[in-house]
Amino acid sequence: MSSTPAAAGEVLLPAAHGVALGVAAGTLVKVTNPYGTQAIDFWVYNAADHSEFLSMDNLRSVNSVVAANRDTRLVSTRRRTLVTIVEDTSSGNHDTLLCPCNAAIYAEHGCEGYHRSCSDNHHEALGALGITVPTTPAALNLFMSVRVEPDGTITRLLPSSRPGSHILLRAEMDIVMVFSNCPQDVTTINGPDRTPRDCMLEVIPASKAAA
Ligand SMILES: [Zn+2]
């Protein structure tokens, strides 16, 4: 199954919602964090075969890192590079360790009734492209930092990117990118005021990228 490439131009990634884009090889996608505070869960699928997708365990194995930066190869379950980080003006160290938020997490937090989640956003955004996948893979958590302590525990850090920070991603094959503007409003992962905020995506065609 293939996916029609998204049109060039800007796409709103609304607070607490998700967006999926078909992206042809060579196309750039710019992810801008206007306030610097928003965590964005990110997944990638091979457009022709959704059983191949961005893999956090293979990423850590291939790169020998626990967080992604400019030089990190974003590899698939088959250890092929799906995406290259071309630019990164954020504070870096994008988390690979923590799971996408899901209904069970918000129930643990004591939320009553439905609460949006990155897991649901992932499936909802893919559904808008007519794509169904059986599970929610681990995400690359853009703009989200954690610290692994000497005793092996994880400390969740406050967001530390400057307002207007961006990451520029290049598709290395025909793929589907999925972004979730994390709806977390109980913990401070999206800033001390616990408020998800809009972000922007910009699709830049390969022809313009090379110009
Ligand atoms: Zn989330």
Image: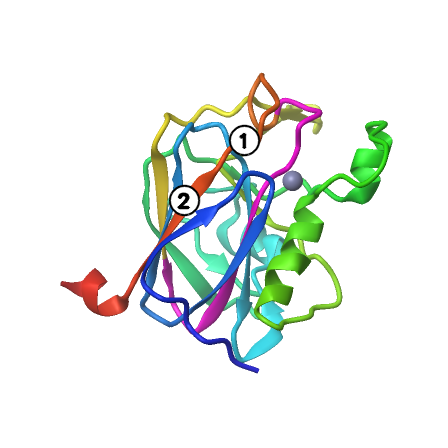
Q: Which residue is mark 1?
A: 145
Q: In percent of the image, x 67 and y 59: which residue is there?
A: 123
Apparent side of residue 108 relative to residue 77 in the rendered image (left or right): right
Q: Is residue 132 above or below residue 203?
A: below
Residue at which label 2 appears: 200
In front: mark 1 or mark 2?
2
Q: Is residue 185 magenta?
A: yes
Q: Quadrant of the C terminus?
A: bottom left
Asked whether 140 or 32 is in front, the reply is: 32
Q: Give the percent coordinates (x, y) of residue 21.
A: 48, 63
Ligand 1 is found in which quarter of the picture? top right
Residue lying at 31% horizontally and 68% vertically, measured from the top left: 26
Residue 114 picture location, percent across and down: 80, 41
- Mark 2 CB lies closer than 8 A to ligand 1: no
Q: Is residue 116 above or below residue 25?
A: above
| Residue 186 position in % (x across, y down) | 71, 25
- Place residue 149 in its image quadrant: top right
What residue is shown at x 64% (from left), y 37% (from top)? 183
Is ligand 1 within 8 Å of the beta carbon of the residue shown at mark 1?
A: no
Q: Secondary structure at mark 2?
A: strand
Q: State the SS at label 1.
A: loop
